């Protein structure tokens, strides 16, 4: 887990407490040192002698190349992460998992680019053409700027080229060096409404986050801490069937029900770097992790 000084980041303190309640050994990772390429320093709090049990990183999102470095450094010490780099990429980057879930997630296309200036504008225009007048969501391969909804996330009409390009250009400018992979355009689907976010004003929908471990949903939580879900029941078995298509032992599915009643996959993510919603039962997750072999 990442830390500040020799204490975990505040966001992960409840997870440290849960790990201790469930008898899970844990150690802190110096995230800053990892990102700076100082791997020995990053792992200095990890015990020298580890058993054969897989390790789980719980912390902030890592670019794939940083995750590769972490994985390799642990292998050198005789340890192994539960999730190998190929599985991390599969769930972390939308273009990697999209084909596996194409029929169960909003229609998407993407334009690669390591930096905003690398994103080819002619390819963006061609991609917009494929959506006609549909509304769209703008993101990169990993994240959107959803709390900047009208400025850098939502395009009401893909055929309104000046407005669409303005939202896309704003998104790219604000992502800057944080852009991952390139630009993604996703068809906007109307999910069951929840409320408007109390701070950003973005429209919230009744989204749920599922943590999947070895093919089973071990935690299902309402995604948002605001609004009333009215006891909505997620069709767990249906999503476990979809999970069988995902080559990772530990990942998340964010899911929601459309206004027409169809359940959809909104997003996939690596289980190690996906945040726990405020309403989530942290003990349910760590009880499942404690059973890992």
Image (spheres, helix red, strand yellow):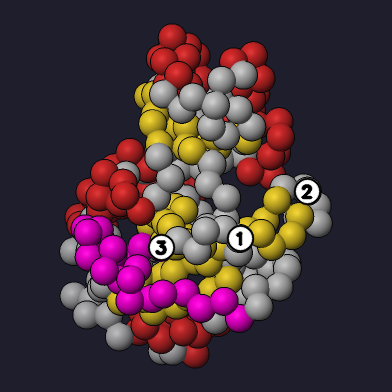
Mark 1 or mark 3, whichever is nearer to me: 1
The residue wearing badge 3 is 252
Mark 2 or mark 3, whichever is nearer to me: 2
Q: Which mark is residue 273?
A: none
Residue at the image position 53 percent from the left and 74 percent from the top: 221
- Residue 248 falls within the magenta-colored stretch: yes
The residue wearing badge 2 is 201
Q: Which mark is residue 192?
A: 1
Residue at the image position 50 percent from the left and 85 percent from the top: 283
C-alpha separation, residue under disc 1 versus residue under disc 2: 17 Å
Q: How many marks?
A: 3
Residue at the image position 27 percent from the left and 80 percent from the top: 292
Q: Which residues are magenta?
A: 231-252
Q: Residue 31's spot in the image, x, y percent?
A: 48, 51
Q: Secondary structure at mark 3?
A: strand
- Left/right placement of residue 111 relative to residue 231 reads left
| Residue 245 seen in this snapshot | yes
The 10 Å Cα crowd at callout 1, few under 14, some 14 to 19, many 20 or more, is some
Q: Secondary structure at mark 1?
A: loop
Q: Residue furthest front?
A: 260
Q: Residue 251's spot in the image, x, y percent?
A: 36, 63
Task: Report which quarter residue 167 is drawn in.
Answer: top right
């Amino acid at each position: 887990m990442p830390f500040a000084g020799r204490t975990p980041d505040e966001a992960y303190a409840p997870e440290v407490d849960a790990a201790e309640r469930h008898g899970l050994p844990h150690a802190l990772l110096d995230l800053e040192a990892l990102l700076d390429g100082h791997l020995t320093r990053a792992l200095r709090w990890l015990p020298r002698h580890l058993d054969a049990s897989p390790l789980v990183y719980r912390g902030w999102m890592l670019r794939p190349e940083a995750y590769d470095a972490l994985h390799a450094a642990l292998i050198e010490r005789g340890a192994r992460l539960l999730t190998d780099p190929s599985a991390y990429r599969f769930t972390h980057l939308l273009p990697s998992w999209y084909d596996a879930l194409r029929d169960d997630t909003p229609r998407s296309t993407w334009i690669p680019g390591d930096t905003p200036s690398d994103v080819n504008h002619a390819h963006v225009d061609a991609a917009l053409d494929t959506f006609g007048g549909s509304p769209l969501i703008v993101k990169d391969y990993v994240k959107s700027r959803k709390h900047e909804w009208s400025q850098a996330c939502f395009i009401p009409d893909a055929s309104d080229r000046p407005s669409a390009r303005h939202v896309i250009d704003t998104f790219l400018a604000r992502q800057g060096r944080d852009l991952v992979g390139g630009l993604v355009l996703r068809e906007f689907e109307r999910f069951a409404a929840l409320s408007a976010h109390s701070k950003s004003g973005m429209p919230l929908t009744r989204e749920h986050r599922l943590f999947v471990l070895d093919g089973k949903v071990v935690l299902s939580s309402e995604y948002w801490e605001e609004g009333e879900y009215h006891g909505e029941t997620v069709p767990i078995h249906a999503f476990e069937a979809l999970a069988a298509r995902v080559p990772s032992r530990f990942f998340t599915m964010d899911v929601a029900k459309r206004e027409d009643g169809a359940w959809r996959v909104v997003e996939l993510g690596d289980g190690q770097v996906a945040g726990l919603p405020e309403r989530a039962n942290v003990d349910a997750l760590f009880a499942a992790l404690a059973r890992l072999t």
